[in-house]
Amino acid sequence: MTTRTPLMAGNWKMNLNHLEAIAHVQKLAFALTDKDYDAVEVAVLPPFVDLRSVQTLVDGDKLKIKYGAQDISAHDSGAYTGEISGPMLSKLKCTYVAVGHSERRQYHGESDEICNAKVKAAFRHGITPILCVGEGLDVRKAGQQVPYTLSQLDGGLEGVPADQVESIVIAYEPVWAIGTGEVATPDDAQEVCGAIRGRLAELYSQELADKVRIQYGGSVKSGNIAAIMAQPDVDGALIGGAALDAEEFVKIVRFRDQ
Ligand SMILES: O=C[C@H](O)COP(=O)(O)O
């Protein structure tokens, strides 16, 4: 019997300016009820430039919605033009930060070593990393999705102690399913999410592995979320496109009603 609270996190990617962000979070706040928040943790990951506006709204209206960033610098300060540090995100009271999203790995050359440094930077400043892992189509076609993803997991967690890892969130996002409309089957999601939990048990302990939330991400919508959430090792979703539509995101949060 799991006691893990599902985490539904909307990764807005490079969408919604700060004014649109306010309107969007207001729509979510209007629709979501205490019953929703009791059942599911709800978070949004807006672009950096929206975070102060979202923080002001969440603080001012005492909203239960959580928020976080889409990336974090591995460094805490200094001559790193364009980067945003852990102390800056922590000052904005970010609960979460995505680390190693496949779009960061693909377009910004983020290696497992960089992701590992970013995981450590997040923990250093009291922010929970959502470490993203997952294979591309070539790896999936070769049937190597489990070893490939576990190797990313190992790299991302290198040297991270158990007392931090027990609060981490892992997002399994098969790259071939991101923004393509191609959803992994519930069995595909379970295969890799189950393997991730198994690996956490090997690296740390079964007790720790049972605490860690593992999300699925990749073309999640209200119509497919219930079957994915029915899998024993899937504890939520990292939602891209569908999170930009407030009504659709709320339906995903209410996956139990589907
Ligand atoms: O972070 C979210 C994932 O990349 C999934 O994006 P998507 O729901 O648009 O496929």
Image (spheres, grey):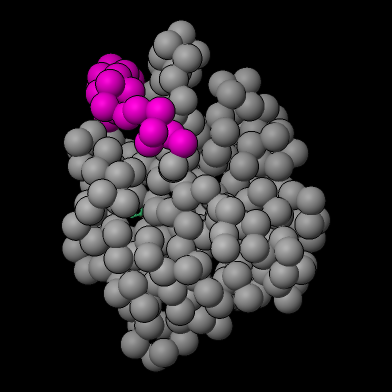
Q: 103 or 201: nearer the eye?
A: 201
Instruction: Provide residue 177's location: percent of width, then percent of height.
Output: 29, 67
Residue positioned 62% across, 20% down in the render: 91
Which corner quadrant of the figure contains ligand 1? bottom left
Q: Is residue 187 above or below residue 87?
A: below
Indicate the quadrant where residue 131 lies. bottom right
Q: Residue at x 56, y 21 (%)?
A: 92
Q: Is residue 119 visible?
A: no
As drawn, the residue found furthest toward the top would be 60
Q: Position of residue 100 (x, y in %)?
A: 52, 55
Residue 83 lies in the magenta stretch? no
For this rendering, which residue is in front, 219 or 28? 28
Q: Is residue 86 above or below residue 171?
A: above
Secondary structure, magenta segment, majority class? helix
Quick check: 46 left or right of 121? left
Residue 105 in the image, given as x and y percentages of width and height: 47, 59
Is residue 41 at all visible to an observer of this figure?
yes
Q: Is residue 250 above or below residue 132?
A: above
> What span is in magenta?
16-38
Residue pictured at 33% horizontal, 23% vertical: 29
